[in-house]
Image (cartoon, rainbow, N blue to C red):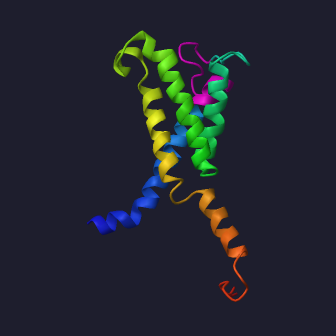
C-alpha cells in the first residue's frame, strides 16, 4: 500500500497546492475587487488601496495564491505567503486571545502552515515549475543524449 501511495504523492501534493493556491487567491481577490462577497462584514466592499497591512496582505494573497495555483515559483511564493499569514496571526489575531478558535485566526494559521509545507515539498505534479524545469534540462543536454522527436 505504501508503494502505491508513494507513486501518487506528487499528484496529491499538486492537488493540495492547487486548492490552497485557489483559496488564497480568492481571499485576495475578494479584498481587492469586492468579488465573492468582498471584505468580511462589508457587504461586497474592498480594502482602500495602500492601507497597511490589509491592502498589502490582499496583494500578497492574490499574487502568491495565483503563483501557487499555477505551480510557478511555488517555493518562493509559498514562503512569502506563509510569512504574511504568520504576521497576520501574531499581529492581528493573537492579541485578541491565545487560541485561533477564540481570536478568529484559524484561516491565518492554516494558510501559514499549508504554505510552509509547500516551501519544503515544492509544487508536486501538474505545475508549471515541472514543465519549465523539464524543458530547460532537455535543452542543456548534449545532442547525443536528447530523446529523438518522432512524428
> Percent x, y for residue 126?
55, 59
Residue shown at 61% from the left, 26% from the top? 30
Q: Is residue 135 above or below residue 90?
A: below
Which of the two residues, 8 or 121, is positioned nearer the viewer here? Answer: 121
Please identify the dominant SS of the magenta region: loop
Confirm whether residue 35 shows in the render: no
Task: State left or right for residue 7 relative to residue 82.
Answer: left
Residue shown at 51% from the left, 17% from the top? 91
Q: In this view, does 72 lie above or below 142?
A: above
Q: Specify the farthest residue to the top.
A: 96
Q: On the rendered image, what quadrant is the C terminus found in? A: bottom right
Q: Is residue 139 above or below residue 121?
A: below
> Percent x, y for residue 120?
48, 49
Within the image, what quadrant is residue 127 found in? bottom right
> Percent x, y for residue 104?
42, 18
The span picked out in magenta is 27-44
Q: In this view, does 104 lie above or below 23?
A: above
Taking the magenta stretch, the answer to whether it contains residue 56 is: no
Which of the two residues, 49 or 39, is positioned nearer the viewer here? Answer: 49
Residue shown at 62% from the left, 23% from the top? 31
Within the image, what quadrant is residue 66 found in? top right
Taking the magenta stretch, the answer to whether it contains residue 43 is: yes
State how many labels appear: 0
Amino acid at each position: 500500500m505504501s508503494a502505491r501511495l508513494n507513486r501518487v504523492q506528487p499528484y496529491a501534493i499538486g492537488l493540495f497546492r492547487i486548492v490552497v493556491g485557489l483559496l488564497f487567491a480568492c481571499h485576495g481577490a475578494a479584498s481587492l475587487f469586492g468579488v465573492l462577497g468582498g471584505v468580511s462584514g462589508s457587504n461586497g466592499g474592498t480594502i482602500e488601496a495602500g492601507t497597511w497591512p490589509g491592502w498589502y496582505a490582499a496583494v500578497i494573497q492574490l499574487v502568491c495564491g495565483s503563483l501557487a495555483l499555477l505551480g510557478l515559483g511555488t517555493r518562493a511564493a509559498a514562503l512569502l505567503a506563509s510569512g504574511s499569514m504568520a504576521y497576520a496571526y501574531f499581529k492581528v489575531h493573537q492579541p485578541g486571545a491565545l487560541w485561533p478558535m477564540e481570536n478568529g485566526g484559524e484561516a491565518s494559521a492554516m494558510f501559514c502552515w499549508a504554505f510552509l509545507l509547500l516551501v519544503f515539498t515544492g509544487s508536486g505534479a501538474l505545475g508549471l515549475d515541472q514543465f519549465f524545469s523539464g524543458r530547460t534540462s532537455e535543452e542543456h543536454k548534449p545532442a547525443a543524449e536528447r530523446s529523438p522527436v518522432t512524428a
